[in-house]
Amino acid sequence: MGLDEMHPRVLRELADEVVKPLSIMSEKSCQSSGVPTDWKRGNITPIFNKGKKKDLRTYRPVSITSLPGKIMEQILLETVENKKVISDSQHSFMKGKLCLTNFVAFYNGVTVLVDKGRATDIIYWELYKAFDSVLHNIL
């Protein structure tokens, strides 16, 4: 369930009824370059990731938002992907493009450079802690 406490089944069963209002809201959002205030709200909830459950560092923050907002976000994402707005080099958070596929593409690129005898410098910057952490003092 989303922040609005609406069960996904409600929207699924009432899809024929809610499609028109959601479509109007989406169109107005595009015209005004903004979204309804309720769609911007979210509850940050710590979700267990891996490791010991008693260790607060093993939790990651997840934002629980409204269900209609999530639906519109998914529609927008699919539209952006279909129109090729996002570069093919974008990995992670994209359907079918994992961090692993990013690594394989990078490795292939470096291999081509090395095979051609080109000098290649690599800087590895591990960012997982920036995205996979929780402010422990707010739990």
Image: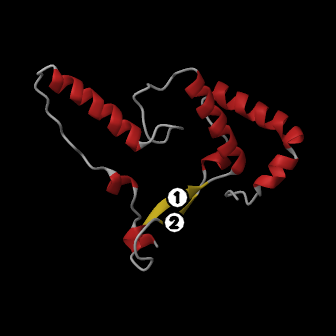
Task: Specify the quadrant of the image occupied by residue 90.
Answer: top left
Q: Which residue is mark 1?
A: 62
Quarter of image, res 80: top right
- Can you give x and y, in whole percent of width and height, for residue 130 in the image? 34, 54
Residue type marked 2: Ile
Residue drawn at point x = 72 percent, y = 28 percent: 27
* Residue located at (44% from left, 25% from top): 87
Q: Between 62 and 31, which is closer to the camera in this rendering? A: 62
* Colour scheme of the rendered structure: secondary structure
The mark found on residue 41 in the picture is: none
Seen in the picture, residue 49 relative to 116 is either above or below; the reply is below
Mark 1 crowd level (few <14, some 14–19, many ≥20, 10 Å Cα): some
Q: Secondary structure at mark 1?
A: strand
Q: Relative to 82, is 66 on the left or the right?
A: right
In the image, residue 125 lies at what x, y percent? Answer: 24, 46
Circles 2 and 1 in contact, beta carbons < 8 Å: yes
Residue 77 vs residue 102: left or right? right
Instruction: Report x, y in % for residue 78.
Output: 62, 31
Q: Which residue is mark 2?
A: 47
Q: Position of residue 39 (x, y in %)?
A: 65, 46
Q: Secondary structure at mark 2?
A: strand
- The local crowd at label 2, few if under 14, some if 14 to 19, many if 20 or more residues have their Cα within 10 Å, is few
Q: Residue at x 10, y 26 (%)?
A: 119
Give the quadrant of residue 54: bottom left
Outermost residue, bottom side: 54
Q: Disc 1 residue type?
A: Val
Residue at the image point whose x is 88% and y is 38% from the top: 16
Mark closest to the chain's N terminus, 2 or 1: 2
